[in-house]
Image (cartoon, rainbow, N blue to C red):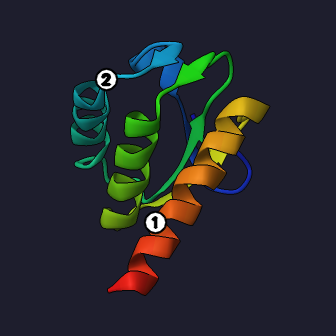
Amino acid sequence: MKNKNNFSKIKIKELIHSNLGMNSSLKKFIQRIEPILITNIEIDFTDVIFMSRSFTQEYIYQKNKTKKNIQEVNVPHDISQMFEVVEKDFKFKETQY
């Protein structure tokens, strides 16, 4: 489904689960969207109730690795906080090397 900003929206709950804990499920998710010709993708976090730190780390790693333009939408507050913590950790580690 495309929106007015030429982004295709993918509801992560529908393709994985509302509890995002398994890195392997994220890797399968990325494998499914990587071959899609669409370059602008919105990942919709509506109704996601949990996301583990390891899932978040893998999500950020895969997002930075892909050539796709991925944006998150409808991110619950606690998930948003997890993104912030993990992104700060990545930035800290980058400055250490």
Residue 31 sits above or below residue 6 on the image: above
Judging from the image, what secondary structure is the residue with disc 2 in? loop
Mark 2, other Cα within 10 Å: few <14 / some 14–19 / many ≥20? some
Check disc 1 and report the residue beneath it: 90
At horizontal 40% and vertical 19% (from top left) the residue drawn is 15
Total marks drawn? 2
The image shows residue 39 at horizontal and vertical percentages of: 43, 60
Which of these two is toward me, 87 or 17? Answer: 87
At horizontal 30% and vertical 32% (from top left) the residue drawn is 29
Which of these two is toward me, 33 or 84? Answer: 84
Which of these two is toward me, 40 or 88? Answer: 88
Residue 38 sits above or below residue 79 on the image: below
Check disc 2 and report the residue beneath it: 22
The image shows residue 75 at horizontal and vertical percentages of: 71, 35
Q: Residue furthest front?
A: 96
The image shows residue 10 at horizontal and vertical percentages of: 52, 32
Q: In the picture provided, is 26 more to the left or to the right than 14?
A: left
Mark 2 or mark 1: which is in front? Answer: 1
Which of these two is toward me, 50 or 39? Answer: 50
The image shows residue 93 at horizontal and vertical percentages of: 41, 73
Quarter of the rendering containing residue 97: bottom left
Judging from the image, what secondary structure is the residue with disc 1 in? helix
Real-space CA distance between mark 2 and mark 1, rounded to the nearest whole angstrom = 20 Å
Quarter of the rendering containing residue 22: top left
At horizontal 41% and vertical 53% (from top left) the residue drawn is 38
Question: Which amino acid lies under the numbered mark 1 shown in the image of this protein?
Answer: Phe
Q: Which of marks 2 and 1 is nearer the N terminus?
A: 2
Q: Which residue lies furthest to the right in this view?
A: 77
Q: In the picture provided, is 2 more to the left or to the right than 66?
A: right
At horizontal 40% and vertical 22% (from top left) the residue drawn is 21
